[in-house]
Image (tube, helix red, strand yellow):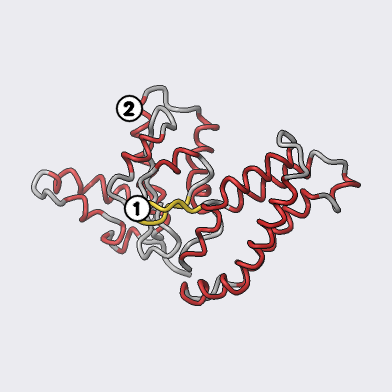
Amino acid sequence: RTSGCAEYPIVLYEYQPSRKAEHAQAFLKDFSGWLHADGYQGYHKLPENIRVVGCWAHARRKFDEALQTLPKEKRQESPAATGECYCTRLFQLEQSLADLTPEERYNKRLELEKPVLDALLAWANEASAKTAPKSALGKALHYLREQWPYLVRYLEDGRLELSNNRAERSIKPFVMGRKNWLFSNTPAGAQSSAVIYSLIETAKENDLDPYRYLVWLLNNAPGLSQTDEAWAESFLPVNAPQECRIPKP
C-alpha cells in the first residue's frame, strides 16, 4: 500500500503460495524507494534500491511479551519494562510531531528522538551481555539489535513512519474474512479475492462508496476495455464520478 502522505492512496493485494523472498522481489521489481515492513528476513534480501524501514510496534511487542512472563510484582522494575518504556517514549514523541511538515518532523526527530535511540541501543548492548539468549527478554533484545539498521531508518525522511501499522491495518479485512468464511480453496480463487479486496479497500481509502464504485466499474469497464488500451486508468478512484463519492459531513 501507499504511505500516509500519498495524494491518491492505493491498497493492492497479491496472493502467493509461500512467503519466499522471490515473490516480494518480483512484485517490487520496478519499485525504488522506502518499504515499510515487519522484521521478515525475506524483505532484507531485496535490491539495494529498496530501503526497508523497520517496525517499532513489533520491537515494542517483543518487550511486552517478555514482561508478561514475569510475576506482576516484578514487572515494574524489570529490564523488560525498561525496553518497553524506551519504545513507548518514541511513540509519544512521534505523536507530538504528527502535525508538522515532513521537513519539520525530520529535524525534530533528530533533535528529540535520536538521543532516545542512542540511549536505547547502549542499554540493549549492555543488557544483552547479562541476559540468557533464549529467555523472552533475550529474544526481545536480539530482535532489537538484529533489526536496528532497519528500525532507525525512519530518521532518513520525515514522511516515513515509526511502525508498519498502516500496512497491518490494511491486511486486517483480508484476515478477518479468512477467519469468518475460511480461505479460498484454489490459488485462482485466492487471487480473485485479492483483486476484489484491492478494489474495495482502495475505494475506501479514497473516500468512495465501495458498492457504487464497483457498480460503476462493472457497468463501464467491459465496453471501454474493448476499444481503449489504457482503459484501466480511466477507472482509477480519482476518475470516479461524483455519485461514487461519500458525501462529506
- Front residue of 31 and 216: 31
What residue sits 27% from the left and 51% below the top?
Answer: 216
- Front residue of 182 and 21: 21
What residue sits 62% from the left and 67% below the top?
Answer: 113
Residue 202 x/y as whole percent: 38, 52
Left or right of residue 100, residue 93 in this image: right
What residue sits 55% from the left and 32% below the top?
Answer: 179
Q: Residue 188 carries which label?
A: 2
Left or right of residue 184, residue 172 in this image: right
- Counting every numbered tag in the picture gives 2
Amino acid on which disc 2 is placed = Ala
Can you say whether 71 is above or below 48 in the image? above
Occupied quadrant, residue 43: top left
Kindly state the secondary structure of the residue where label 2 is placed: helix
Can you say whether 97 is above or below 138 in the image? below
Residue 87 visible, this orientation: no
User: Which marked residue is nearer to the observer: mark 1 or mark 2?
Assistant: 1
Can you say whether 177 is above or below 148 in the image? above
- Front residue of 127 and 63: 127
Residue 221 x/y as whole percent: 20, 47
> How far is mark 1 from mark 2, CA to CA?
32 Å
State the residue position of label 1: 49
